[in-house]
Image (cartoon, rainbow, N blue to C red):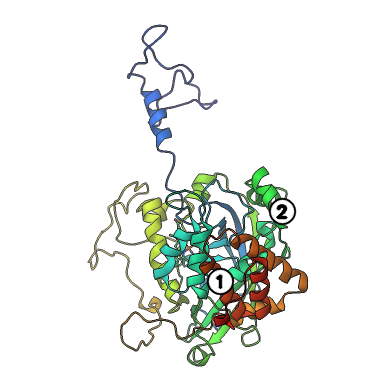
Amino acid sequence: MSNEKKYLTTASGAPVGDNQNSITAGHRGPTLIQDVHLLEKLAHFNRERIPERVVHAKGAGAHGYFKVTNDLSKYTKADFLSEVGKTTPMFIRFSTVAGELGSADTVRDPRGFAVKFYTEEGNYDLVGNNTPVFFIRDAIKFPDFIHTQKRNPKTHRKDVNAIWDFWSLSPESLHQITILHSDRGIPATLRHMNGYGSHTFKWVNANGESVFVKYHFKTVQGIKNLDVDLAAKLAGENADYHLEDLYNSIENGDYPEWKLSVQIMPEEDANTYRFDPFDVTKVWSQKDYPLIEVGRMVLDRNPENYFAEVEQAAFSPGHFVPGIEASPDKMLQGRLFAYSDAHRYRVGANHEALPINRAKTEVNNYQRDGAMRFDGNGGSSVNYEPNSFDGPKETPENNIKPFEVTGFADSVAYDSEDHYTQPGDLFRLMNADERTRLIQNFVDHMQDVEKDEIKLRQISHFYKADPELGTRIAEGLGLSVPETAK
Ligand code: HEM
């Protein structure tokens, strides 16, 4: 058989004689079970889908690189940040949160901003959003929160009652929902928005000294947002508007770029700062902790295959490298479990070995077997430890930095109940037009809530953030600010 032209084969490699006509008994059929090529085609097709991500299902991915522009090795021993000019390949996935795999891009929703750095010390994943804060601050509330963002169990439609019921009963969400209903709630494109690590992380240097950090990716393209009417029109006409824009801009050589900066908090300050610096519903003042440049991220290559590279990509906040560690943030701690657990369910026990997820470094451990173990499975090398057969050894210098913990184990609430200062400050920073659009967005979203009780509870929160905000939203909804809020 000629090798010059590719010929069609079955999955087991045998040449296929006919890919248009199934094997039938005689001219009219019926079809014979003997047509194993037909059986294979139909059976494989039935298995083409894996479960979509339970959140952030709709997304776009791109390859690129990260280049260090400022030496911060006095704060972290992370090798990929060790010297100016050091360049690390990376992959990013942008996403919306609440919609399904085929949902529209131009909805009001946070955008996921998940970055995988393929460093020489293994993969470092920074799984953030385009907002510096989050709706809740304890992982135990996450499944309930997401249920309110998804479909009503009876109507199978989005449920504005559930959304505002939950938010009004979880006032820690006020900061994030103020950002969400501002102009930034619908980015013009994925290229025109910032990204944030949101949580506080720990950096450790070569001397074992640590600081706390927050990450900020600032878009070099500038922030641009979509007008609500245009966004609604696009959601109907081109559900993949953001995917298309990102793909085309990279394809046309117009490579999007972000500057990465960090805020650095000395470890001691964490005990005395005016609020809990591990509370992900709050930002650190940039007057207290100014942005310090780290490097630039450039996206210069589209995926060759969406399923292989974007759908199977598995980002986990638990993918750290030496020099970068978790902070005590209760949300982050929950996420350290949730993601790899999701990947084992969604992609499988050996998801880390897939090309998009596989570290560029050698991966040496004693995990073996499992469904779809498609690499050499460790070959004949020793599969237990301790051993006398030269198996891979632990490296104590890569232990986490020991840290002290105190207190009674209990279900403990956060100390601060101040959910109002930061969203109020954000509102007061807005110019008159921005305030009017924010208020209109809130009114439009809340007006279909059936129970006044829910609307009034939420109006009280707005009022506590800023009397103008609360009063104008109440007016827009034809209600009055409850006396108890004043
Ligand atoms: C995706 C859980 C909070 C950003 C996911 C997924 C899960 C999850 C299970 C799907 C993973 C997959 O199937 O690949 C949680 C839990 C949270 C939480 C339990 C709170 C305890 C957050 C926060 C952020 C965030 C605070 C941002 C600061 C993302 C992003 C993705 C994602 C960007 C998509 C990753 C990708 O592109 O593959 N989350 N999440 N999540 N989450 Fe969270």
Q: Is label 2 in contact with label 1 (beta carbons under 8 Å)? A: no
Q: Residue at 42%, 45% (x, y): give it.
A: 50
Q: Is residue 206 above or below residue 67?
A: below
The disc labelled 2 sits on which kind of residue? Answer: Asp
Q: Residue furthest right?
A: 432
The reply to whether residue 100 is in sight is yes
The image shows residue 284 at horizontal and vertical percentages of 58, 82
- Compared with 379, 326 (above or below) is below
Compared to residue 181, the image places residue 300 above or below, namely above
N-terminal of the pair, mark 2 or mark 1, is: 2
Left or right of 385, for residue 341: right
Secondary structure at badge 2 equals helix
Q: Which circle, 2 or 1, is nearer the viewer?
A: 1
Q: What is the x, y in percent for residue 151?
A: 48, 52
User: Is the C terminus in the top left, top right, bottom left or bottom right quadrant?
Assistant: bottom right
Asked where in the image residue 328 lies, by quadrant, the reply is bottom left
Given residues 38 and 395, the one toward you in this image is 38
CA distance for labels 2 and 1: 27 Å
Q: Nearer the viewer, residue 253 or 145?
A: 145
Task: Find residue 229 and name its label.
Answer: 2
List the residue tagged with mark 1: 456
Q: Position of residue 485 (x, y in %)?
A: 57, 81
Near mark 1 (Cα within 10 A), the count class, few <14, some 14-19 or many ≥20, is many
Q: Looking at the picture, which amino acid does disc 1 mark?
A: Leu
Q: Element under label 1?
A: helix
- Residue 17 position within the rendered picture, expressed as x and y whole percent measured from the top left: 44, 18
For disc 2, the neighbor class at 10 Å (few under 14, some 14 to 19, many from 20) is few
